[in-house]
Image (tube, rainbow, N blue to C red):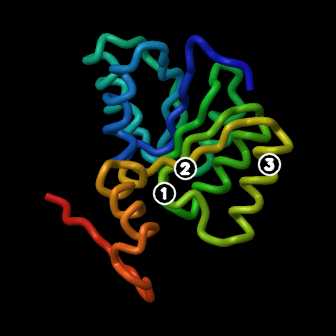
Amino acid sequence: APKLNIVRIGIVGLGMRGSGAVERLSYIDGVEITALCDKYPDRVTKAQKTLEKMKRPGAKEYSGEEGWKALCESEDIDLVYTPTPWHLHTPVALHAMKNGKHVALEVPAATTIEECWQLVNTAEETQRHCMMLENCCYDFFELLTLNMAKQGFFGELIHGEGAYIHD
């Protein structure tokens, strides 16, 4: 896909993760939040206030059970970011890519192997980027542990399990 100097983002899902993303994305040069969508209109209103507080222009508003479809079909969006409930990640991503949008999904990108292949195949067919976001896959500690495991530091690994603690 060609380089974009300005990335126009539509956000589908303005709950905990999505509402925080409105502010985080507002700090990035070259980013415009051009559309906001949530099942609940009051969340869209709250996100608009965040854009105003960040001195960013207001965005188009979409709401309701299927407002995300209209957002994905909009002409003024380059990338759809979807921090929705898990069952919507793949449908939103597929609809976005089929409408010419790049996609950034929260984890998990899909909940079945079939959905994973749908994402891969659609990204290849449409030549749109489809990226699953994860904030701790490639950090120092994860890569250090992977490197140690590959060098045999832990011996033969039979089972692994991990977790992290939130505040």
Residue 122 % position (x, y): 79, 48
User: Would you call the spot at circle 3 few (<14 residues within 10 Å), some (14-19), or many (20 or more)?
Assistant: some
Q: Residue at x 48, y 14 (%)?
A: 30
Would you say 128 lies left or right of 164 here? right
Is the Cβ of the residue at disc 2 closer than 8 Å to that at disc 1?
yes
Is the Cβ of the residue at disc 3 closer than 8 Å to that at disc 1?
no
Residue 141 % position (x, y): 29, 55
In this rendered view, identify the residue nearer to me: 18 or 62. 18
The amino acid type found where label 1 is placed reads Val
Distance in Å between CA atoms under marks 2 and 1:
6 Å
Write down the residue under mark 2: 132
Quadrant where the C terminus lies?
bottom left
Q: Secondary structure at mark 1?
A: loop
Q: Earlier in the sequence, mark 3 or mark 1?
A: 1
Write down the residue under mark 3: 122
Q: Specify the label residue 107 is tagged with.
A: 1
Q: Secondary structure at mark 3?
A: helix
Q: Specify the label residue 150 is tagged with.
A: none
Q: Secondary structure at mark 2?
A: strand
The amino acid type found where label 2 is placed reads Met
Q: Residue furthest bottom?
A: 158
Distance in Å between CA atoms under marks 3 and 2:
14 Å
User: Would you call the spot at circle 2 few (<14 residues within 10 Å), some (14-19), or many (20 or more)?
Assistant: some
Q: Earlier in the sequence, mark 2 or mark 1?
A: 1
Residue 163 % position (x, y): 29, 71
Q: Residue at x 81, y 44 (%)?
A: 124
Quadrant where the N terminus lies?
top right
Quadrant of the image occupied by residue 44: top left
Distance in Å between CA atoms under marks 3 and 1:
18 Å
Is the Cβ of the residue at disc 3 closer than 8 Å to that at disc 2?
no
Quadrant of the image occupied by residue 142: bottom left
